[in-house]
Amino acid sequence: MNEQLIIRLGSQPQQPISWLVWSAVNKEIIASGQLACADELSALSERLGRRPVVALVPAADVVLSEVLLPAKPNRQIIQALPYMLEEEHAEDIEQLYLALGQCQQRGKEYWQQVALCKKVQLEQWVGSLVVAGFQPMQLLPDALLLPLHQDGASAIELAGQWLLRQGPWQASSIEPGWWPDFLSLANIDLIHSYSPWPAELLQNVQAAEPELPLALLAQQLPEQKFSLLQGQYAPKKAGNKVWSLWQSSIVLGTSCLALYLLTLAFGVWQQGQLLQQQRAELVTLYKSRFPAESTRDISRQLARKLQGAGAVQDSSLFSLLNDLQQELAATTNVRLDNLKYDQKNSELRFQAEADSFQRFDNLKTRLEQKGFEVKQGALSNEGGKVQGTVAMKVKT
């Protein structure tokens, strides 16, 4: 998008706020307006918030200066800058925010540009924008965007104050009543004024083409790289837009998938534990019938017994045991307590425990579908566990 939203904040949230939508390509105003106070920023965000945002703040609240460094700048020297400035400022340096501009070499000397403002003031500006839904990409003093002139300074009136720029790192804000004293001290040869100059002020002034203040400032944005948003306040780098849109959905989906896999794994583990328990019960019954035989492969041994059994009662028992084992494996959360075979009636009786009445009904239905005659005794529910007796035999 080649349009920028420029917002000029006041020193206090209750002061008026000017805004401008600027086309950098066509160098023209798309829209402009004024808000009564910072509370109205949210409504502006809903209308225009998708555009890149540049925030301007009153130059009166930011002190620009240059510091002579003791040597070529390095990390240690930059970290010591606040203490080098401590004697020049009456306020506690810990309460001030310091932003770095360019470091210029002049002969053998190194001069570091610095900008100072109150930390609480910066947090107020940034907070007002963020709460309203804006993510400013740049924040700087308004006067620093006035045009540079080799033969003099530039000035324009904005929000009842005059903005003045005398050099690349010389920008200030002047109350109208302070002009006489300021001009007598500043000794400025020429001022290019983009607003009507007060007639009572004796100063060499060249009237420039009148401009809407924010439009004039917007034209210098491509050349001005400085921003107060540094360190913890620096804007995050823009990532892939598609990734940004889908990132939260992907994270949520991944979390859900991980939870599903954990639940599935736990279910498989529970089923395995149940099968091991049921196999142990079957092995116990088998050993009671055939104590001398191994139970390494119980399923295959049962099948062989069924194939080679000469007695009808043995064949019936093995058939019942084999099918019961299969149906117990298919019916979850049913645990056998004991087994008893009625050889006279070729009937297998067992007591079981389940987590619901429905488990018993499911087991009974599956056994009946296998062709067995199933009788289910009375069921009882104790401590959340359902217990009961089941008798099964081959239908005749």
Image (cartoon, rainbow, N blue to C red):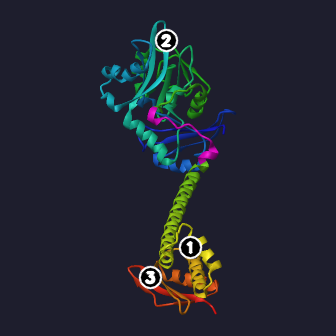
Q: Residue 105 — which label?
A: 2
Disc 3: CA contacts within 10 A as few (<14), some (14-19) or many (>=20): some
Mark 2 residue element: strand
User: What segment carries the magenta color?
Assistant: 231-244
Point 63% across, 44% down: residue:
241
Of the residues shown, which amino acid type is indicated by label 2?
A: Gln
Would you say residue 37 is visible in this rendering? no
Point out the frontmost of discs 2 and 3: 3
Q: What residue is shown with label 3?
A: 386
The verdict on residue 302 being magenta is: no
Up-down relation of residue 268 to residue 153 (above or below): below
Mark 3 residue element: strand
Instruction: Report the Cα–Cα distance between label 3 and label 1.
Output: 18 Å
Outermost top residue? 107
Instruction: Report the Cα–Cα distance between label 2 and label 3.
Output: 88 Å
Q: What residue is shown with label 1?
A: 329
**Count of labels shown?**
3
Asked whether disc 2 touches disc 1, contact meaning CB atoms under 8 Å apart, the reply is no
Q: Earlier in the sequence, mark 2 or mark 1?
A: 2
Q: Nearer the viewer, residue 178 or 119?
A: 119
Q: Earlier in the sequence, mark 2 or mark 3?
A: 2
In the rendered image, residue 138, in percent from the top left (x then y), is placed at: 53, 34
Q: Nearer the viewer, residue 323 or 55?
A: 323
The verdict on residue 235 being magenta is: yes
Outermost right residue? 26
Of the residues shown, which amino acid type is indicated by label 3?
A: Val
Q: Earlier in the sequence, mark 3 or mark 1?
A: 1
In the rendered image, residue 24, in percent from the top left (x then y), is placed at: 65, 33
